[in-house]
Every structure is written in C-alpha cells, then in structure tokens.
Image: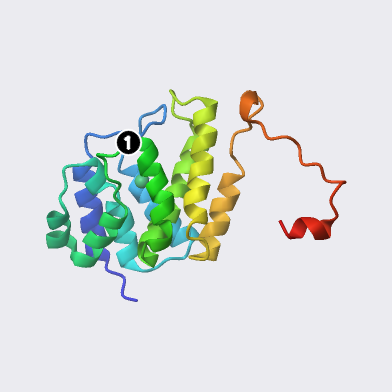
Amino acid sequence: MQFRHAQLLKAIAFAAQKHRHQRRKDPQASPYINHPIDLANVLLHEGGVRDTTVLIAAILHDTLEDTETTPAELAVNFGGEIRDIVLELTDNTKLKRRKRKELQIKHGPHLTRKARLVKLADKICNLRDVAANPPTRWSLKRQIEYFDWAKAVVDSFRGTHVRLERIFDRVYEQRPHAERWTRHVKPAVRGPRFSTRQRRGN
Ligand SMILES: [Mn+2]
C-alpha cells in the first residue's frame, strides 16, 4: 500500500488548526492535537497498521465531534472515504452522554474495519491517559466505569485486529481498583464449589 506522506501531513496540519483552542483533560492540559497523533502512533508502531487512510482518519477522528469542521470540508480536503470513516466515529452530540455511550456499544459491530481500527486505538489511548493522569474532577467510580465502558465497546467488535486488542487488554489491566468504592465490589468468586469443567460452560 502506498504511503501518502503529503496527505498525512496535510491532515496533521488541518487537525492542529481545528483543535488549536482545545486542551486535554490531564493536569498539564496538553494540546488536544497530541491525542490524534497518539492514535496514529499506536496504529502504526504498535499495531503495524500501514494503511494511510486509517492513519489519516485517526488524525481527523475528533474534528467533526469537537470542532466546527463539516463533513463537506473533510470530503473536499481528504475525499469521501475519509469523511465517511470520521462520520462513523462521530457521536451525535445532541444526545445525553449516557445514551451516546450506549450507542457506541450498539453500533460497534456495524462499523467498517477502518473505523474499528481507529476506535480501538482511541480506546487504548484514552485508557492510558486516564490510568496515567486521571482527569482532575473524575471520581474513582467514574474512572472504573470508563474502563468498563471502553472494554464493552472493544468487546462489541472483537476479532478486528488481534494485536491491537491484546494491547487494549493489557491497558485494561490498569483499571483502578474498587477498594474505596465498596458498594459495587463484586463478591469473591467461590472457586472450590465448581470444577474447572463445569465453569468452562458458563
Ligand atoms: Mn478521541
């Protein structure tokens, strides 16, 4: 597959300009553009994804949802395929957060492969960010719920990219513990009463 350097650089410049007034939620309030660049890095260097269309879509994935960018603008600058992938990755911001989260799980199985790859990288990067620097106003409960929701989204399209899914699962292991959140701690699994064989069927 041809690596379209010029288009990729154009996308980085475009997204940097569109996100120029936004910051991430970490304590340093990093420039927002670091996030889409992180995704492209995860895809290329950790996932071995060399399809430039996917990398460009990763760079642009939050422009429709979080900036004034229009689908037509994406089509003019980057073509209809990129526009459509970014549209697949765009939540309907008119809906409540809970509903939007629910729809990401519901729509997961119907996403195109390219959109799934970007979404996988997005969840990997977001969990890493929350694990390393929990947003200052997020309670432990919210962090745990975020990890579990991200996993439910990834589970909805498992089998898309084994390597990236394995990376996701390793990041998920950093899910904060619920010791201080006693209401929702699950009872310990009672192992001895079940043989391995019986449990396998569950
Ligand atoms: Mn994102």
Q: Give the camera-side residue of 137 and 42.
A: 137
Q: Residues within 10 Å of mark 1 (few under 14, many from 20)?
A: few
Residue 22 in the image, given as x and y percentages of width and height: 26, 35
Mark count: 1
Q: Is residue 105 left or right of residue 140?
A: left
Q: Position of residue 34 (x, y in %)?
A: 35, 43
Figure quadrant of the C terminus? bottom right
| In this view, 108 is above or below 96 | below
User: Does residue 38 show up?
Assistant: no
**In the image, farthest residue toward the bottom:** 1
Left or right of 186 on screen, residue 57:
left
Q: Return the x and y of residue 64 as percentages of the image width and height.
A: 22, 48
Q: Nearer the viewer, residue 110 or 36?
A: 110
* Amino acid on which the number 1 mark rests in the picture: Lys
Residue at the spot 22% in from the left edge and 63% down from the top edge? 7
Residue at (52, 48) in percent of width and height: 151
Q: Is residue 142 visible?
A: yes
The one nearer the camera, 199 or 66, is 199
In which quadrant of the rendered image does the N terminus lie?
A: bottom left
Q: Which residue is mark 1?
A: 96
What percent of the width, then of the height, locates residue 153? 47, 51
Q: Is mark 1 within 8 Å of ligand 1?
A: no
SS at mark 1 in the image: loop
